[in-house]
Image (cartoon, grey):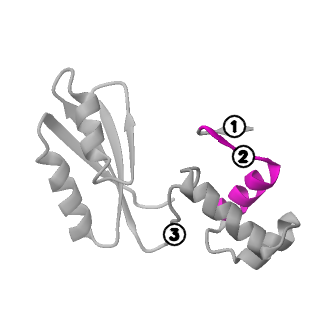
Amino acid sequence: MKYNNTFVDEIDFKILSILKENSRTKYVRIARLVGLSEGAVRRRIKQLRDEGVIRRFTIETSVELEGIVLIETEAARTREVKERVKEIADRVFEISGEYDIAALIRAFTIEELNNKIDEIRKLPNVVNTKTLIKLKD
């Protein structure tokens, strides 16, 4: 199967599934689960990274704050603002309604969260923002 202009087989999909569940899974364990040697798994993961199928490894913690910033932009400048916000926020979406963009920001402190929100507010072509802070899941 072709994915991002790269041929990815069933074993690659199994490896990706395991890493999505836990990006710290040891190569030896992945090898056991997919029926390959550790070296073969290591080579496949390197190839998936080199070809851009795996873009980054991340972690999630339970101690972080999450905020959603709703952003209103100047007419016809949404795409430009969205690209700039991607450099600041963890996830960015174009949305419909009163606001043009929603940005998810994760931070370990309220100060860090505020700093990222301030960065967004200072961007050219940002007209207005509204911030929502997640209280609980």
Dominant SS type (magenta): helix
Residue 78 position, x and y percent, is 25, 29
- Which mark is in front, 3 or 2? 2
In terms of sequence position, does the residue under pointer 3 or pointer 1 come before the other? Answer: 1
Residue with the most extreme right position: 35
The image quadrant that residue 36 belongs to is: bottom right
Q: Which residue is mark 2?
A: 8
Answer few, some or many: residues within 10 Å of disc 1's Cα (few below 14, many 20 plus, some between 14 and 19): few
- Give me the residue at 84% from left, 64% from top: 34
Q: Which residue is mark 1?
A: 2
Residue 46 position, x and y percent, is 61, 63
In terms of sequence position, does the residue under pointer 2 or pointer 1 come before the other? Answer: 1
Q: Which residue is mark 3?
A: 59
Report the span colored magenta.
Answer: 5-20
Amino acid type indicated by mark 1: Lys
Describe residue 4's horizontal placement relative to residue 129 as left or right.
right
Residue 99 position, x and y percent, is 27, 31
